[in-house]
Image (cartoon, rainbow, N blue to C red):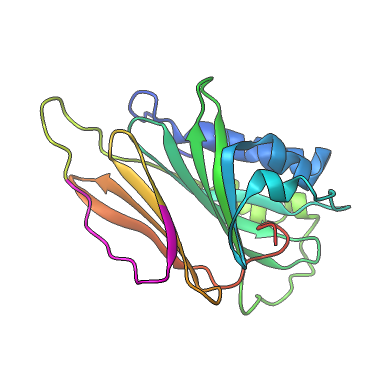
Amino acid sequence: MKRALVGAPGEAQPTRVVATELAFARAAREDGQWTAFRAFAAPGAVIHARSGVVDAGAYLSGLADPAEAVQWAPRAVWMSCDSLIAVSQGRFRDPEGKVGTYTTAWKRQSDGDYRWTYDVAVLDDPQPPPRPELGPASEDEIVVSALSSIKGLVSDCPREAEPVPQPPEFAVAPGVSHAMATSPDRTLRWRWEHKAGGDRRFILEYLTSGKWVTAIDQSLGMASPEKAGE
């Protein structure tokens, strides 16, 4: 966690999201997977499932905790300069040993804590060859490798009296469901898209070195039932 980012400006400290993410994963192991999802969810949080984006509160309320939770850890965190929204992306491993990538959006709450507002997870296809030499999931490469190489990235902070560069325009095809979140300081934005038939996409853009950069533009494919709630 100490490697995430040192010396970030002001309140924008990606280490705080990393710490919350790790506490979230630990709670899943110790208290139960869906219990942890409910405890760390922000009001109005959503899960991007196979059928589309669903209300997390309604969906999770009917789920019993599995005997063994998915293991996960972040690899990168992007945060707006004002620290109010962030996106993390990392790797997960399910109890059967299958691995994949997840993406989670976070919002800073009035008490300063971060809670997740959007979550999606996708299994690797094809799966990598099995690694029988690996130890328990809590000690395998999903967690250990991630902790040694977490990237923390903060958007440019607007200078006083200088306008914030406008983000690029985008178009969404007819019939595609979508939603977007933009930080109040307009330095980071993310959005999801969902086409009929299950074609899904996640895009993250942030302001860095004076220009807007696309950090994630990912076709999500089919959701992982273990972490994405479907």
Name which residue lies at 44% across and 66% down.
218
User: In the figure, 153 relative to 212: above or below?
Assistant: above
Which secondary structure class fits the magenta region best? loop
Q: Quadrant of residue 41?
A: top right
- Is residue 174 shown in magenta? yes
Residue 165 position in % (x across, y down): 16, 44
Give the camera-side residue of 122 and 74.
Answer: 122
Residue 119 position in % (x across, y down): 58, 52
If the image is split into quadrants, where does the C terminus sit? Answer: bottom right
Q: Quadrant of residue 203?
A: bottom left
Give the camera-side residue of 20 and 57.
Answer: 57
Tell me where the magenta segment starts and ends, as one range: 166-179
Name which residue lies at 67% across and 39% down.
24
Name which residue lies at 81% across and 43% down.
32
Residue at the farthest front position: 175
Name which residue lies at 28% across and 40% down.
187
Q: Is residue 2 visible?
A: no
If the image is split into quadrants, where does the N terminus sit? Answer: top right
State left or right for residue 118 relative to residue 27.
left
Residue 208 position in % (x across, y down): 25, 45
State left or right for residue 29 relative to residue 20.
right
Q: Is residue 176 visible?
A: yes
User: In the figure, 17 relative to 69: above or below?
Assistant: above
